[in-house]
Amino acid sequence: MEAPLSGVSAPARLAADGEGVGHDELALAARNHGLPLEALRYDVTPPGLHYVLVHYDIPPTDGDDWRLTVGGLVRDRLDLDLPALRAFPTETLRVTMECAGNGRARLAPRPVSQPWLVEAVGTAEWTGVPLRVLLEEAGVEAGAVDVVFTGADHGVERGVEQDYQRALPLAVATGEDPPVLVAHAMNGMPLPPQHGHPLRLVVPGWYGMAHVKWLRDISVRDRPFDGFQQNVAYRYRQDADEAGEPVDRIRPRALLLPPGFPDFMSRTRVVDAGPVTLTGRAWSGAGPVVRVEVSADDGRTWADAEVAPPGDHRWAWQAWHAVWEARPGDHVLTVRAHDADGHAQPVDQPWNRGGFGNNLVQRVPVHCR
Amino acid sequence: MEAPLSGVSAPARLAADGEGVGHDELALAARNHGLPLEALRYDVTPPGLHYVLVHYDIPPTDGDDWRLTVGGLVRDRLDLDLPALRAFPTETLRVTMECAGNGRARLAPRPVSQPWLVEAVGTAEWTGVPLRVLLEEAGVEAGAVDVVFTGADHGVERGVEQDYQRALPLAVATGEDPPVLVAHAMNGMPLPPQHGHPLRLVVPGWYGMAHVKWLRDISVRDRPFDGFQQNVAYRYRQDADEAGEPVDRIRPRALLLPPGFPDFMSRTRVVDAGPVTLTGRAWSGAGPVVRVEVSADDGRTWADAEVAPPGDHRWAWQAWHAVWEARPGDHVLTVRAHDADGHAQPVDQPWNRGGFGNNLVQRVPVHCR
């Protein structure tokens, strides 16, 4: 049977050879936004500079009557208002969050969706109640497998009408290191509307699709969740009809704070000849970043940068720096990160049909005068 | 003589017939952002949802050592730190700000630049020192014509290296109703980095290019300012080689808060049959909005909406609403504003080479079930 909304909601597709970004992709790019790369200078991203990706609409959320329910396979169903939720013990974690679609628009063929280049990232201090505390309070029953999270944003996607829903395996949901948070504050302030006000999930080390915003229900299930965002979207696939692999943890990436000053239109950088200190950030969801390499010749030769250890903030990006002796002419700077789990960023373009996890190295054209 | 940076900074150009948005426009769309249209529901736009357009980089600005100088054709040059500036009397004004390039990507041929559709707008409460107070303190000398404002953002644009600079005629700069503000707070908080921290100009009724961010110098001149952003960019032109007309006040526009819920990719809306209350905002820099019309058949027939008077907030958008009796099928909603100065939004596409002031009516496809 044809889905009732198939007429307004088309299947996923790939752009044709040479097809530029269209008005639909542009409308997404205009409403969502990345981190302006110069904002890599801040350890914690100021409000309004952190990347934002909203699937449907930002829902109207009046904090006064918000309720969070915790149910399903539990001993005692919880029905919490915000004061009740805030009465639980809280933790604050600095977390780097990245959209799973970051890098999508650099793929060929280009999956038609939110067209990120490299900038869908940000780091914030999230304060909230550890999810394991709420699940302990409710009492998870034997046989539990997945925990499903439902947000208040409602829409249709590839013909499927839905509230945004994602699940985590029970072991991740009840983890202590890192804890998953039911966050009610970002950088010490109530969540802004676009970041999930009044409540969102924060899953350190995972791509953004797991951090369910406008969180209103948590449900423990005795079988794997097979919802749209789990089993249809957010899979690594080569072909449309394969099951694919789930998108979960953030792949390693390093970004360079573009040096010098930019041309408005091309974003090409201008620097003066001489030593230029290059700085940036690097992160991975699989383990700390242990090595960052810098190339000033578009990846032909590489030199090691100095990488700060993760310190107290294992789930946040790490700073790195290197000195580049700039000589007059045109150059392409690039960087790549390696994590403790043995993963490194690719220098050749990988591809998957959804455009997920594309951590191809960033390229920064620079003119030295 | 060729400009020294012409190799990295190309002249303005128009997209070829059928040329999609390229990576350069996409990089601008990813770093800058518009108002997600559902945020039209807020009288005052929450932080992070207000549109942002940055020409070069957001400069690193440490508020502690920031200085604002007021010089040129004045009796007493001022050199103010932030405590000295804040010691002057302040005013708070609710102002709707819109990018002059809003609507650019809907033009054919498309001027290649920041590719806005309709969403480059926002409304904030700006608090600051009236510019006329600072100019009185400095003492403007006889013969003054223009007041030039210099920001701290530095870049190259069409081969011209520059700090961002714009000017206002003396009569506008010293106006009382509305006052021009040297703002140090937005919605009661210090300015965020992307909105000009620690100081920006706010020029009620004018497009965004006049509201110079990261303001560090004000200079009174005895002749019209002929800088790049005044005489090269931000002109209404049909041909590249004509002088054109200056871009200044905001043209009327109404926007509709898209009803129902969206398809993720197409942003087409889904509503249920029956009466649907349509709401939105309307504004103009030339006079209050006196009439808003709504069409549910893509502009063939129109009905008047109810428009709230400007009340205490003459320089902010006005709310409007109308009831639409939705019948099953596919519809295109559109709205248009008329201001007290006799201007109305066009329903046919006007065109200019820079893509400025394109207030062509918004089109919202809706599927009614």
Image (cartoon, coloured by chain):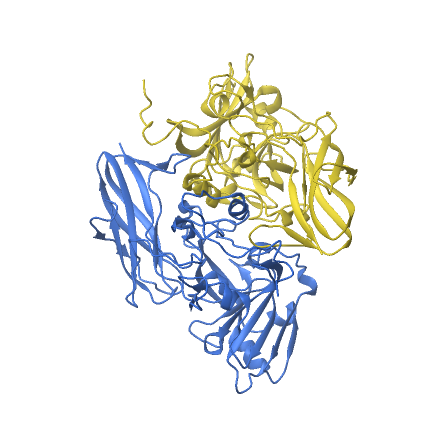
Chain colours: A blue, B yellow
Residue B150 placement (x, y as % from top left): 47, 29
Q: Could you tell me if residue B87 is visible in this image?
A: yes
Location of residue B54 with respect to A349 vertically, above or below: above
Q: A314 or A206: nearer the eye?
A: A206
Q: A250 or B71: nearer the eye?
A: A250
Image quadrant of residue B246?
top right
Residue A157 placement (x, y as % from top left): 57, 59
Image quadrant of residue B85?
top right
Location of residue B106 with respect to B36 vertically, above or below: above
Q: Could you tell me if residue B219 is visible in this image?
A: no
Q: Is residue B326 left or right of residue B204?
A: right
Q: Is residue B175 left or right of residue A36?
A: right
- The total number of labels drawn is 0
Quadrant assignment for the N terminus of chain A: bottom right
Q: Which residue is most to the bottom?
A: A142
Quadrant assignment for the C terminus of chain A: top left
Residue B61 placement (x, y as % from top left): 44, 41
Q: A126 or A102: nearer the eye?
A: A102
Q: B136 or A19: nearer the eye?
A: A19
Residue at horizontal 42%, vertical 34%? Answer: A264
Residue at horizontal 53%, vertical 59%? Answer: A188
Residue A50 placement (x, y as % from top left): 48, 52
Q: Which residue is most to the front?
A: A1
